[in-house]
Amino acid sequence: MSINIAIDGPAGAGKSTIAKKLAEELSYVYIDTGAMYRAMALYFLEHQVDAENEEKISRECRNVEITISYENGEQQVILNGVNVNGKIRSEEIGHMASVTSVYSAVRTKLVELQQELANRENVVMDGRDIGTCVLPDADVKIYLTASVSCRAKRRYDELTAKGETCELSVIEADIAKRDHQDMTREHSPLRQAEDAVLLDSSDLTIQEVVERILALVKES
Ligand code: DC
C-alpha cells in the first residue's frame, strides 16, 4: 500500500513549497494538483471557452488530456501532448482555474488522475480537496493556512523580487476573492477535513512547518 500525505489550504499559504520539501525529505513524489486545474484553464482560455458556460466546458473536457511527468524531480504538466509548465503560473490562469474548477466535469476528470497517481506511489499531494475528497484515507492530512495579509505580503515579495510592479492592496483583494470562490463553491469546496491537522504558517518559517509535518508523519 502506498503512503499518502494530503496538504490542503488557501492560495498563497505555502503549500507547494512545503509539499515539495516534504516530498524531498521523504523521497515521495510531489503532486501539485493546482497545476492540473491551471492546465485545464489554459485549454479553456486558448479555445475561448466561456467560463460561465458549464455545458460547453463539460463538452470540451472530453477533448482535454492531462498527464504529468517529472524532469529533474520537477512536475511537468502535459496538456494534449504539450508541456505547458511555462504557461500556467500567471494570475490570469490562476483566476480561470479557480472559476472553472467549480464544475463537476472538470473535477471528476482530474480527481481520477490524482487518485491513480496516489495509488501507485507514496505521494505528498497538495490542493484544496485532497483530504476531503481525493484521498479521504490519506495517512496524514494537513490544512495549511496563513492570514490574508501575510499571504498577500509573501506574494508581493515574490513578484517584486522578479522585478514586477504590483500593489499590495490589489494582491490582498485578489487573494480574498479567490478564498471566497474556492470556499463557497458547490462541489468539493476548500475546507479543513475533520481529521486534518491545522497549521497556520503566518509566524512559522518554511523549515518549522516542514519539521512539524515530518513529526506527524513519524507518529502516523
Ligand atoms: O493551488 P493553485 O493556486 O495552483 O490552484 C489554482 C486553482 O485551482 C484554485 O484556485 C482552485 C483550483 N484547485 C481546485 O479546485 N482543487 C485542487 N485540488 C487544486 C486547485
Image (cartoon, rainbow, N blue to C red):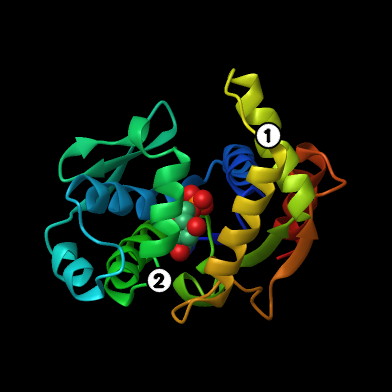
Residue at 57% in and 43% down: 23
- Image-based side of 89 in relation to 151, left or right: left
Residue 118 image point, x, y percent: 42, 60
Residue at 78% in and 46% down: 150
* Residue 7: quadrant of the picture: bottom right
Q: Disc 2 or 1, which lies upstream in sequence?
A: 2
Look at the numbered disc 1 and give the secondary structure of its residue: helix
Disc 2 crowd rating (10 Å Cα; few below 14, some 14-19, many 20+) is some
> What is the number of the mark on residue 102?
2
Q: Tell me, yes or no, whether the two marked residues, 2 and 1, touch with CB atoms within 8 Å.
A: no
Q: Is mark 1 within 8 Å of ligand 1?
A: no
Residue 10 image point, x, y percent: 62, 59
Disc 1 crowd rating (10 Å Cα; few below 14, some 14-19, many 20+) is many
Query: Which is nearer the eye, 90 or 69?
Result: 90
Residue at 45% in and 59% down: 98
Q: Is mark 2 within 8 Å of ligand 1?
A: yes
Residue 100 image point, x, y percent: 35, 63
